[in-house]
Amino acid sequence: MPKPREQEATAIKVEHVKKKYLLYHERHDSLKDLILSGGRRAKYEVLWALDDVSYEFKRGHTYGLIGENGCGKSTLLKAIANILRPESGTVTVDGRISALLELGAGFHPDLSGRENIFLNGAILRLSRAEIEARFDDIVAFSELEEFIDMPVKSYSSGMYMRLAFAIAVNVDPDILLIDEVLAVGDVAFQRRCFRRIKEYQAAGKTIIFVSHDANAVKDLCDEALLLDHGKIVASGLPMNIVSAYFELLSKKEAARRVKSGEETDVAGDDLSAATQKRYGFGAATIKEYAFLNAAGEPVKSIKSGDRVRVRVKVEFNDTVPNPVVGMALHSSTGLDIYGVNNAYTGQPIAPKNSGDWLEAEFVWDAWLREGNYSISLGIVDLTDGTATPADRWVDAISFDVAAGQEIIGLFDLRADITVTENG
Ligand SMILES: Nc1ncnc2c1ncn2[C@@H]1O[C@H](COP(=O)(O)OP(=O)(O)OP(=O)(O)O)[C@@H](O)[C@H]1O
Ligand SMILES: [Mg+2]
């Protein structure tokens, strides 16, 4: 039986930590600026990178820190590592911390890899003898034998990371802080890092791991924290916190869309159209859309192979002689995985006039690999073979596919295997 959480030993206690940065604005020294500001120009803005953060990190657990760029993840790790001094609040740490923060932080560019190992060891308060005893293991783990006497400024990002990780995990820390850096390692090295992290977990060390890779967080961590504007807005099971994160992102996306919709509305055929979120000539408007499960309930997350329905409701504001309604599915890296519309399937829709409407439903089985996907929607007029967008909504829907049956590649083509054998 594991102990109740409150009885577990605390490794790191963060109490009411606040960290602010002053953002200095560029000086606009035009006469008009001076007159308008009456000479009292605001010179800076206060940004709370950490806004009253409190948390108890228990010994022997692995925590995942997630959130948008600039939400304060690295700042929190630096406060824990005692690299920056907060404005107020306290951080109490029980044990030796080893931190893998920004790439190259803690390295001296003109010194060789060898010298940097000694430098870092000294920063971690290891004696020369202790560093010498670990030196070979560090170099072996980094696989940088041939480069160890070159200045680290000649290293690639991946080589920096190898050396930093090798040092961090060979100085026998009780607490390991890892800030996103693993992503720059090659696949083989990443795998070795993850294996080493798992050894650390088994040895009962405390780990805080910042990552934008939701799968890595779900796989490695037993607890996750979601940061937003310098505050912890959710904490708990990684699975739940990752969904909360995606929900937060789609809420912000929707808010941004409303804002930019007011500003640009349906734009013309200018070149920037392809990168806009929503564009078209306005002869029709996507009024509503929904991503539903087989039972017709709205969902954000599905399992691989689930039957889903994408429903779109369109209202016409003008005559559209040949309406074509479609959807496209994209991977999180922006790859177009699939697209379909009623013209491809040979199902013409009758001409529409102002005040008319239509509702379309696209039903398919989502045999997709685990991950985050988006769907774009569109209504176009296909008169004389030319597609004129009436309303196109890029990445309107975002959803998650949870791990199910293992899929090699992007999606499952549901192959039937027939084997003919002798004997
Ligand atoms: N040295 C600094 N000077 C001024 N502002 C800073 C400084 N370091 C961080 N900030 C600001 O503090 C906020 C939090 O930054 P932080 O680096 O902690 O974000 P993050 O969550 O790690 O983001 P990312 O995912 O991009 O790594 C950001 O708005 C950033 O602009
Ligand atoms: Mg960061």
Image (cartoon, rainbow, N blue to C red):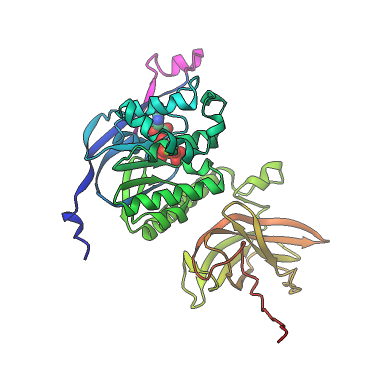
Region in magenta: 27-48
Residue 213 drawn at (x, y percent):
47, 51
Indicate the quadrant of ligand 2 in the picture.
top left
Which one is in front, 408 or 118?
Answer: 118
Which residue reaches farthest right? 384
Q: Is residue 123 visible?
A: no
Which residue sits at x=30%, y=37%? Answer: 97
| Residue 244 location (% of width, % of height) | 39, 56
Query: Can you say which quadrant of the picture contains the C terminus?
Result: bottom right
Q: Is residue 35 magenta?
A: yes
304 sits left or right of 197 in the view = right
Q: Is residue 317 magenta?
A: no
Query: In the rendering, at what x and y percent does residue 186 appear?
Result: 56, 44
User: 237 or 377, which lies in front?
Assistant: 237
The residue positioned 59% from the left and 49% from the top of the image is 277
The residue lying toward the viewer, choosing from 327 and 415, is 415
Is 169 above or below relative to 20? below
Q: Residue at x 48, y 78 (%)?
A: 295
Q: Is residue 300 left or right of residue 332?
A: left
